[in-house]
Image (cartoon, rainbow, N blue to C red):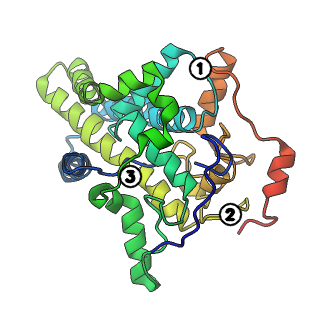
Amino acid sequence: MQARCRKPEGTLITDSDYTAGMPAAGSPVDRIANAAVTVVPLVLIAVAIQQSWGGLLVWQDVLVFFATLIPFGFGITVGFHRLFTHRSFKTSRPMRFLWAVLGSMALEGPVIEWVAYHRRHHRFSDCEGDPHSPHGHGSGLLGALRGLFHAHVGWVLFSDESAEEERYAPDLLADPVVRFVDRTFLLWAVAGLALPFGLGVALTGSVFGGLMGLLWGGAVRIFFLHHITFCVNSLCHFFGRRSFATTDHSRNLAWLAPFTFGEAWHNNHHAFPTSARHGLGRAELDPSAALIAAMERLGLAWDVVRIRPERLAAKAVGGAQ
């Protein structure tokens, strides 16, 4: 069991309340759906590998992969995470709708449920109540492996805990734009699969090309996005360096940061959850923060949360650990 280190209730958004995570299964139907979305792409990865080794991979497939990976990935990191969970910036109703839709098309679950689990993780980070901590699952190598599996994918497949949306996301339940996208999640999930199929057909002029687009922009893209999210939950609470003092085991994992759109500066994020920028050092690449800054310059984002140098200095651990 994890330590009983319950943290104070606090308000919806504070610097110690609320990270990336796919919602766990709360009902048998949810568990089946989560298992299907997690396991089926894994099976289809074998088809993609065979296709690549057999010389059947073409540039159109690669284009479809990135054409879906990038906007849907930002839908999670900029939309679900920094906008809806932590309110790191403000934007217009049409942009809130767009970010909610893009995040939903990533197939990591409905927006309000995602946010509720995410805030809960921050509230109980690495303590009893955290839905996906890798800690507290036994001692030694076996305990570590068991914990990493739980944090990475086990909690998605086997947890019965509910998201408690009324408790952790009342602001989003009261938002008609976000609530509409949440209630129509299935529509956006299907659209997230129809898009790569349509792109494949458009680029190749054949149904076969559409199916290959669905393979690379559907199954492979889902597999990749899911597992970079899972890596933040698991690896970034176990490996890496600590730049700031926090009450949990969050760590920065530099090599993972480009693949996670900047989310792997995880110790930085847990130290300052509301910050729009997670890469707080000069050399810490954070594409999601760069996109938010570009939106700000275009007048599409405002009230962007930035952390003052004196606050950074106050929490710095001295030498990275």
Q: Residue at x 26, y 48 (%)?
A: 34
Mark 2 and mark 1 in contact? Answer it, CB < 8 Å: no
Q: Residues within 10 Å of mark 3 (few under 14, many from 20)?
A: some
SS assignment at label 1:
loop
Against 184, is 231 above or below?
Answer: below
Sequence-wise first label, 3 or 2: 3
Sequence-wise first label, 2 or 1: 1
Q: Quadrant of residue 132?
A: bottom left
Please name the residue that numbered disc 3 is placed on: 227
Q: Position of residue 197 (x, y in %)?
A: 22, 26
Residue 115 in sight in this render: no
* Amino acid beneath label 3: His
Position of 43 with respect to 136 (left or right) is left
* Amino acid beneath label 2: Arg
Give residue 242's mark: 2
Mark 2 and mark 1: span between their CA atoms? Answer: 32 Å
Of badges 1 and 3, the one in the foreground is 1
Sequence-wise first label, 1 or 3: 1
Please name the residue that numbered disc 1 is placed on: 91
SS assignment at label 2:
loop
Q: Residue at x 22, y 33 (%)?
A: 214
Give residue 59's mark: none
Q: Position of residue 262 (x, y in %)?
A: 57, 44
